[in-house]
């Protein structure tokens, strides 16, 4: 039975070259093995020009030790989606060449003007770009979000539910090019990137959006600034379903953080108590990426974390009441990932069967690891198919992910770039071409993408929980997902919320629970389309019911019924 | 023990002839000789008991009885007749030898030494006696006393790799003892710092070595060799320019004044034994410094002799350990395999291979090695433990459990085995069983992980308050562990001053 369940349903094909994506990440690797060299690679997917197609932005490195983009090869790059999986470089026209050693990208419409904006975090230099009709302006200084930190990740979310998106930056450590400790095997002349223990933990940064284009640093006031870690991946979800978005930060060789959002704009760190700080064996791991999503369709968002070979990719199942359980072994994930090392990860329903699968962008952190142990540095990516019974199966090979050479993969963004209802993946690799994995999975599962436009809530609807239900597919009856742009290590995707609906051609209900408290329910929604749900300006907490097909069709569909719009997860 | 068996054979060919008061003892004596010569030692024991009862005070018969008991594995019983033989005939060398051998095998090196010293005095070319004496001295950490014997053995058997290896190990220990002594008595002496730096450099910790060398040079800039050592560190760290500066500084130092600096001059002349001998008569950290360095060089010379000999199991064993300590696990495993090929009967080597393969994350290889070990020794606690540990590492707790349960049964006081078993139980959902064993594993908790596992097991068992307390214990443990270990405390390797 298990073999039948593992029959090939997920299929990818790398179309980057023919799509015109010629980006190669330049990390400026040196014999000195500066730690920043092995950490970059953020990528973002978003529709920067509002033409309905998802574009791709790549962060890039810079020269070391100057940390200056002193050559064209170091420029950040923006590729515009021309349709039909074809892209063209519009970096200069958009004004996104960037500066400094860039690492992370975070996309969201922070000023609620309808144009998605972009935050680029990096080594000692952060840039906030405000998007005005497809042209980006550096507003960092004015906004007050600049810093000299080393930012490896960032996330937009409305932590205080005031309708404005706030910015959380994940800082890794303090580092300068002058750090020159020799790590490795001097007898054999092998220098390696230093172990994290040589780098001091630092706190995160939280900036509250004032709504006037400026931000205030509330790191200390919110409680988040009290905790020091070596932050890597960041994932957001309302894990306790209290209407407030919580934050998970994967820490490198330190217990990871789960910041529970309490009302009043204050967070409490509860990772250890909740059981998500460490895997079941209790040893600190090199946690890299994190995704916070309901993989078992029980209504509660779960957590997956990537790490290095031998450390596993822990899967924490949300038990409710603030508790999680490490079910990596029970989910049959443990043996599948034992020899793998991963960075970006995401729960996405690639075959649209109603169950979110798991994708990981793989590579070790130490490019000389093979000289020390039986572990590979460059690896192919992985996809684990969710079998719907709490377990996963490795379909990476049959899915075509091993078709290319193994690489040092890092960032990944997940979106339907060709608007065919199947979520694709763009992945960066150090010193290698980016990959654009077109999802060619066999048609079989229906899908639905929900584009949110907030009014009282932030315009992107970040933090909204979307629930769908159907009776026509025996394998699932309800699914949950939520709107977030924080997905993938150092990466970001701004696109509609995607569901695979399997055999269900019509969804009985589509419920949107907005951060404002508003709840909207659509009924009898046809699958295989992108629907746009605008937050109705009702009394907070009131349920805006739209019963009946006709009401649903009139009020909430996109421009044309059955139209295929780019969608995300 | 081949030499001893030969001795036994010779003893009974040319040994004392028992004058027969009647045919009976003579026949018994012949019978005893035949049994001993045939290796049927246990059968010879009652024969010699009867003979010694019939002819008390006969040193030869007492010796024979003692030998038979020793060769039959009854070392405790062998002691009395051997002591009695020596009481009658103190110069009976075989009695001294076997008395020493019996005590050694009983784990009493201190009792073995006097008779073995006597046996060596009486038979200076007897390698077995000297080898056992050296073994007894090493067992007691008396490396200085063992060294002359080991040196003699190496001269007696220059083609024996074990002889040179043992000598090299002794020199390494002596160098280590010298450093430990200096740390205790002269902790701030530049000579102590320089020696500690050298030890760090050998362990591939160049940054630590660098700072100690720097500190040593600040205290005593004229210790020759330090600039060269720092230059080597600079080169290894990718700074040839800095290395050149340091090398120039070394050239500017005045040469050693051999009238005053005799130890250093002897060292530079590579007369390391002279250095050791002279240092033993001197006081102060400088003498200890040169003594330690001389021992280090002597050790290197001994190991070089082993390397020059045809490949041997003992040599590959040493190289395997060296590489493992350097975390070069693949290479280490290669050496273990070569050692096994040369000495396939030694199960210890297979166990070491399994451990190394485990460290190299070659779990399939480790499991294969362990399967062989389990077939030969199914009731060995350490083998069962490692087999279970490897299966756990392969995410197969169900199969790991029987091995770990057996390990715990065989060695109930092994906290590591309890820890692994506890984790395996937790993974298969047997929380209460996990708790039982994890609690017993806590003495082996080096990083708090066992405390964490215990907390999670309490949680799974629905014991929320116990879970909370265990988690508090974990956090307290981690806080203490981190207290003295601030990252970045040790600065990077800095340019020449």
Image (spheres, helix red, strand yellow):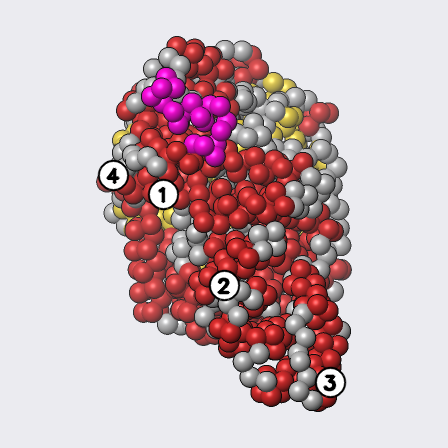
- Per the image, label 2 sits on a secondary structure element best described as helix
Span shown in magenta: B257-275
Report the disc number at residue A241.
none
Q: What residue is disc 2 on? A: B115
Have a look at marks 3 and 1 and say if they share a chain.
Answer: yes
Q: Pinpoint residue B257: horizontal percent, then vertical percent.
A: 37, 17
Quick check: B445 left or right of A54?
left
Q: Is residue A172 above or below residue B317?
A: above
Q: What residue is disc 1 on? A: B180
User: Quadrant location of residue A456?
Assistant: top left
Q: Pinpoint residue B86: horizontal percent, then vertical percent.
A: 51, 71
Have a look at marks 2 and 4 and say if they share a chain.
Answer: no
* Number of residues whose C-alpha sits closer than 10 Å to that of mark 4, classed few (under 14), some (14–19) or many (20 or more): some
Q: What residue is disc 3 on? A: B27
Q: Chain of mark 4?
A: A
CB contact under 8 Å: marks 4 and 3 = no
Q: Chain of mark 1?
A: B
Have a look at marks 2 and 1 and say if they share a chain.
Answer: yes
Report the disc number at residue A220.
4
**Which-is-in-front pick, marks 1 and 4?**
1
Residue shown at the point (61%, 24%) measured from the top left: A431
**Which-is-in-front pick, marks 3 and 2?**
3
Query: Viewer-proximal residue, A239 or B427?
Result: B427
Q: Pinpoint residue B470: horizontal percent, then vertical percent.
A: 34, 64
Sequence-wise first label, 3 or 2: 3
**Label 3 – label 2 distance at C-alpha:** 32 Å
**Label 4 – label 3 distance at C-alpha:** 99 Å
Query: Viewer-proximal residue, A551 or B233?
Result: B233
Query: Viewer-proximal residue, B369 or A361?
Result: B369
**Label 1 – label 4 distance at C-alpha:** 48 Å
Quadrant of the snapshot with the N terminus of chain B = bottom right
């Amino acid at each position: 039975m298990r073999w039948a369940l593992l029959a090939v349903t997920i299929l990818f094909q790398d179309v980057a070259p023919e799509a015109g994506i010629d980006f190669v990440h330049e990390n400026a690797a040196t014999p000195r093995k500066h730690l920043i060299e092995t950490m970059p690679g953020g990528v973002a997917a978003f529709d920067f020009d509002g033409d309905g197609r998802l574009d791709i932005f790549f962060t890039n490195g810079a020269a070391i030790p100057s940390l200056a983009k002193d050559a064209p090869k170091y420029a950040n790059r923006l590729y515009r989606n021309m349709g039909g999986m074809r892209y063209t470089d519009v970096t200069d026209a958009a004004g996104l060449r960037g500066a400094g050693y860039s690492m992370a990208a975070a996309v969201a419409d922070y000023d609620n003007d309808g144009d998605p904006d972009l935050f680029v975090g990096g080594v000692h230099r952060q840039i906030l770009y405000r998007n005005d009709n497809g042209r980006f302006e550096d507003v960092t200084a004015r906004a007050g979000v600049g810093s000299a930190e080393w930012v490896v990740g960032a996330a937009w979310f409305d932590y205080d539910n005031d309708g404005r998106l706030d910015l959380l930056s994940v800082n890794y450590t303090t580092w300068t090019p002058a750090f020159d400790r020799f790590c490795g095997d001097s007898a054999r002349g092998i220098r390696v990137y230093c172990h994290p223990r040589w780098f001091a933990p630092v706190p995160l940064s939280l900036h509250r959006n004032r709504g006037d284009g400026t931000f205030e640093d509330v790191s200390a006031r919110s409680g988040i600034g009290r905790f020091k870690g070596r932050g890597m991946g960041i994932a957001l979800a309302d894990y306790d379903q209290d209407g407030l978005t919580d934050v998970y930060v994967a820490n490198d060789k330190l217990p990871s953080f789960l910041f529970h959002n309490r009302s009043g704009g204050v967070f409490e760190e509860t990772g250890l108590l909740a059981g998500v700080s460490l895997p079941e064996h209790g040893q600190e791991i090199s946690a890299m990426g994190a995704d916070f999503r309901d993989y078992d369709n029980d209504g509660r968002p779960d957590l997956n974390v990537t790490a290095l070979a031998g450390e596993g990719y822990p899967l924490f199942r949300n038990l409710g009441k603030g508790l999680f359980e490490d079910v990596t072994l029970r989910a049959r994930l443990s043996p599948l990932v034992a020899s793998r090392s991963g960075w970006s990860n995401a729960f996405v329903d690639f075959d649209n069967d109603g169950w979110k699968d798991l994708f990981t962008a793989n590579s070790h952190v130490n490019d000389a690891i093979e000289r020390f142990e039986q572990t590979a540095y460059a690896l192919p990516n992985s996809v684990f198919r969710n079998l719907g019974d709490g377990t996963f199966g490795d379909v990476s090979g049959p899915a075509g992910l091993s078709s290319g050479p193994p690489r040092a993969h890092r960032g990944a963004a997940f979106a339907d770039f060709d608007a065919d209802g199947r979520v694709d993946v763009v992945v960066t690799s150090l010193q290698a071409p980016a990959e654009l994995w077109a999802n060619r999975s066999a048609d079989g599962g229906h899908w639905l993408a929900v584009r949110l436009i907030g009014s009282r809530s932030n315009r992107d609807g970040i933090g909204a929980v979307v629930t769908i239900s159907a009776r026509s597919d025996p394998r699932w009856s309800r699914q949950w997902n939520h709107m977030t742009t924080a997905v993938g290590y150092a990466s970001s995707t701004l696109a509609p919320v995607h569901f695979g609906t399997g055999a269900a051609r019509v969804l009985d209900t589509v419920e949107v629970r907005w951060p404002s408290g508003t709840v909207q329910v659509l009924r009898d929604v046809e699958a295989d389309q992108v629907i746009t749900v605008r937050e109705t300006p009702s009394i907070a907490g009131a349920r805006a019911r739209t019963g009946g097909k006709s009401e649903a069709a009139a009020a909430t569909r996109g421009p044309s019924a059955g139209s295929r719009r780019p969608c995300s997860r | 023990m081949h030499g001893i068996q030969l001795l036994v054979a010779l003893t009974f060919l040319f040994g004392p002839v028992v004058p027969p008061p009647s045919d009976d003892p003579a026949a018994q004596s012949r019978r005893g000789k035949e049994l001993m010569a045939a290796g049927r030692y246990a059968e010879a024991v009652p024969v010699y008991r009867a003979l010694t009862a019939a002819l008390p005070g006969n040193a030869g018969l007492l010796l024979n009885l003692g030998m038979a008991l020793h060769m039959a594995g009854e070392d405790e019983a062998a002691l009395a007749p051997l002591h009695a033989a020596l009481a009658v005939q103190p110069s009976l060398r075989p009695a001294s030898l076997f008395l020493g051998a019996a005590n050694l095998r009983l784990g009493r090196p201190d009792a073995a030494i006097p008779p073995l010293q006597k046996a060596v005095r009486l038979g200076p070319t007897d390698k077995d006696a000297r080898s056992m004496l050296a073994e007894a001295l090493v067992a007691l950490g008396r490396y200085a006393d063992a060294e002359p014997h080991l040196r003699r053995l190496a001269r007696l058997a220059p083609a024996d790799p074990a002889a040179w290896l043992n000598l090299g190990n002794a020199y390494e220990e002596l160098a280590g003892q010298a450093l430990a002594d200096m740390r205790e008595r002269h902790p701030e002496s530049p000579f102590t710092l320089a020696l500690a730096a050298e030890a760090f450099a050998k362990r591939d910790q160049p940054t630590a070595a660098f700072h100690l060398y720097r500190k040593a040079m600040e205290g005593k800039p004229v210790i020759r060799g330090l600039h060269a050592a720092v230059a080597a560190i600079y080169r290894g760290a990718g700074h040839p320019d800095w290395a050149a500066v340091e090398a120039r500084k070394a050239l500017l130092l005045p040469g050693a004044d051999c009238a005053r600096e005799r130890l250093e001059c002897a060292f530079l002349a590579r007369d390391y034994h002279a250095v050791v001998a002279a240092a033993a008569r001197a006081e102060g950290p400088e003498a200890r410094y040169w003594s330690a360095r001389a021992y280090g060089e002597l050790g290197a010379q001994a190991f070089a002799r082993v390397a020059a000999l045809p490949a041997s199991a003992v040599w590959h064993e040493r190289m395997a350990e060296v590489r493992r300590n350097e975390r070069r696990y693949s290479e280490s495993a290669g050496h273990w395999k070569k050692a096994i090929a040369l000495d396939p009967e030694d199960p210890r080597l297979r166990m070491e291979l399994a451990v190394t393969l485990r460290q190299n994350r070659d779990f399939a290889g480790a499991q294969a090695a362990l399967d062989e070990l389990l077939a030969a020794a199914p009731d060995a606690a350490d083998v069962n433990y490692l087999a279970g540990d490897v299966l756990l590492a392969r995410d197969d707790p169900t199969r790991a459990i029987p091995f770990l349960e057996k390990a715990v049964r065989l060695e109930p006081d092994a906290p590591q085995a309890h820890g692994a078993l506890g984790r395996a139980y937790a993974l298969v959902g047997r929380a209460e069983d996990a708790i039982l064993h994890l609690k017993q594993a806590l003495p082996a908790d080096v990083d708090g992980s066992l405390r964490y596992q215990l907390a999670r097991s309490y949680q799974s068992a629905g014991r929320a308050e116990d879970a909370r307390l265990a988690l508090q214990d974990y956090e307290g443990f981690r806080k203490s562990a981190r207290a003295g270990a601030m990252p970045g405390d040790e600065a990077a390797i800095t340019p020449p001053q």
